[in-house]
């Protein structure tokens, strides 16, 4: 009788172990997302004032009243629903600034979408006014197909579409609808 009970216990332990082994799966990502709804941000940050430095030199400064972190999605992004004020400093310490009512940064594609009263001003007094502006961080290229106003030293160019590298060396309005010459 003892050997039968022993045999039953061994079978039960074996069945239990095999069941546990085959029912286990790698669900670490699911465990991380417990309590996080897929339509809700993973985190919310308020009153952001972030400065980025490299080798003791200030490279950028970001100010925003709210950021929503959607890194919990398959196509991760960061949303700034109340706008941004972002300053970039070049190697000589010159600053370029962009302000927008709304911004979204797509993590996977390195694309930044700026919307609503976008104003980009450079250290050499060039200023772009646009409804929407995209910035491709990989290619360091900005563009839009929406109406723009582009103020350069002695002229204000109105048009549709804009294209430029990050230093504004190749800046151009794609479809010019008017030019106003300014006296300085």
Image: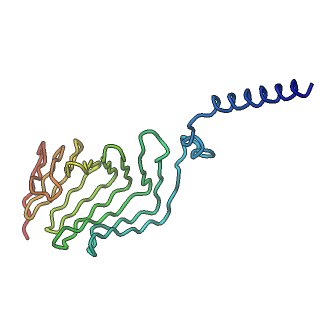
Q: Quadrant of residue 154?
A: bottom left
Work out whether residue 182 or residue 43 is closer to the camera in this orientation and state it. 43
Rendered view: 40 above or below 49: above
Q: Is residue 44 left or right of residue 20?
A: left
Residue 162: percent from left, percent from top: 17, 47
Work out whether residue 18 or residue 59 is closer to the camera in this orientation and state it. 18
Residue drawn 15% across the image and 53% down it: 165
Residue drawn 87% across the image and 26% down it: 3
Residue placed furthest toward the bottom? 56
Rendered view: 93 above or below 154: below
Residue 2: percent from left, percent from top: 90, 28
Q: Tell me the quarter of the image containing the N terminus.
A: top right
Residue 141: percent from left, percent from top: 19, 50
Q: Quadrant of residue 58?
A: bottom left
Work out whether residue 18 or residue 38 is closer to the camera in this orientation and state it. 18
Q: Is residue 174 left or right of residue 21?
A: left
Residue 126: percent from left, percent from top: 15, 62
Work out whether residue 105 or residue 103 is closer to the camera in this orientation and state it. 105
């Amino acid at each position: 009788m003892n050997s039968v009970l022993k045999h039953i216990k061994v079978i039960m332990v074996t069945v239990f172990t095999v069941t546990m082994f085959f029912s286990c799966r790698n669900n670490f990502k699911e465990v991380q997302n417990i309590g996080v709804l897929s339509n809700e941000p993973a985190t919310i940050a308020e009153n952001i004032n972030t400065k980025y430095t490299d080798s003791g030199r200030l490279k950028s400064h970001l100010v925003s009243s709210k950021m929503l972190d959607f890194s919990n999605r398959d196509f991760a992004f960061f949303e700034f629903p109340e706008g941004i004020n972002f300053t970039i400093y070049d190697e000589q310490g010159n600053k370029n600034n962009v302000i927008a009512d709304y911004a979204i940064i797509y993590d996977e594609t390195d694309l930044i979408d700026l919307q609503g009263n976008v104003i980009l001003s450079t250290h050499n007094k060039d200023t772009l006014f646009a409804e929407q502006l995209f910035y491709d961080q990989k290619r360091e290229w900005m563009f839009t197909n929406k109406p723009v106003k582009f103020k350069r030293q002695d002229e204000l160019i109105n048009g549709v579409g804009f294209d430029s590298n990050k230093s504004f060396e190749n800046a151009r309005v794609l479809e010019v609808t008017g030019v106003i010459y300014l006296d300085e």
